[in-house]
Image (cartoon, rainbow, N blue to C red):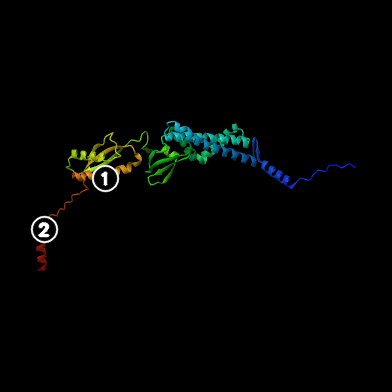
Amino acid sequence: MILQDQPSAPSLGDSLLERIIRILNHEFISQGGLKVSIISLILLVLVISIAALVSRYARRFLDKRILPRVHMEPGLRYTLLMLVHYVIIVFGVLYGLKLGLSVDLTGVAVILGFLSVGIGFGLQYVAADIISGFILLFERPVRVGDRLRLKDGIEGRVQNISIRSTIIVTNENMAVIVPNSKLIQNELINYSYPSQNVRLNVPVGVAYGSDLEIVSQALIEAARSVDEVLATPEPRVHFSGFGDSSLNLEIRVWINEPHKHPQIRSKVNFAIDRVFRERNIEIPFPQRDVRLRAAPININEDASRETGAADDER
């Protein structure tokens, strides 16, 4: 009697594993060269995550080990690190598309063509911000650490420049997020470009009849008493004109801490008030002369009125 081998029944574990693998490998999108499954999406996310980690450690290595050996200003260092980050992320995304979704990279141009249609309808502002971000990173009219004053009066220090927006921290320690296109299109004052030395014009008025030579010496003495005022260039006094109630002058001083210009201006004003009090120099306040004129009295008209009243009584 010959015994034949009977096929063993498949185990529950093997059938469940095969079913999971089949579901993960199922291509729910298969058009042309594009094949999308759950496994391919997981692989795409994994590749992009690895690229993000590589970018993070590469920037940290450059910032801690390489760039400190090179004399480079903080703004340029930040720009270089951001460019390294964007390059690694872009290559990671492209490689993930090719490896995970089997996308032919020559078809990326077609995808960008479709995206350009969307940009034309609703994403033009985002595209403008992104392009402006690259302009800021390459042209560098605004750098991290610069002191800015925007057209609408916002003033603060640039903390971060990203691909779409820039973060400005104001004197009140509030973060203002400004789209990059606003920094490119609108006028702004950069106190830190090209150097830290800036000039402050502090206006002051003195009474008519004051000796302007003594006033000029007092203003220069007050400016030199402030520690933050630079000795070179020297403070100078400018006679701006004749006002309604005062002789208008300006003391022009130079500082190298533009982020402290409100505090320095206040110190200069305090010093001017102190020196003027010591030298009895008068700071006038607006005055107006009021003259009262009485109406002329006509004696003949008043006498005729009295005569007419007496006739009425009779």
Residue ID at (54%, 34%): 88
Residue 96: percent from left, percent from top: 59, 36
- Separation of residues labelled 2 and 1 (CA atoms): 64 Å
Residue 87: percent from left, percent from top: 52, 34
**306 left or right of 214 in image:** left
Residue ID at (59%, 32%): 105
Label 1 SS: helix
Label 2 SS: helix
In-front residue for pair 71/283: 71
**41 left or right of 182 in image:** right
- Quadrant containing the C terminus is bottom left
Residue 207 can be seen, yes or no:
no
- Quadrant containing the N terminus is top right
Q: Are marks 2 and 1 in contact (CB under 8 Å)?
A: no
Q: Amino acid at mark 2?
A: Glu
Image-quadrant location for residue 278: top left
Residue furthest toward the right?
1
Residue 109: percent from left, percent from top: 57, 33
Image-quadrant location for residue 280: top left
Residue furthest toward the bottom?
314
Q: Read off the residue under disc 2.
A: 301
Residue 296 against residue 168 in the figure, above or below: below
**275 left or right of 101 in image:** left
Of discs 2 and 1, which sits in the foreground? 1
In-front residue for pair 277/93: 277
Pick whichever of labels 2 and 1 is earlier in the sequence. Answer: 1
**4 left or right of 260 in image:** right
Q: Amino acid at mark 1?
A: Phe
Q: Residues within 10 Å of mark 2 (few under 14, many from 20)?
A: few
In-front residue for pair 237/1: 1
Q: Read off the residue under disc 1.
A: 270
Image-quadrant location for residue 310: bottom left
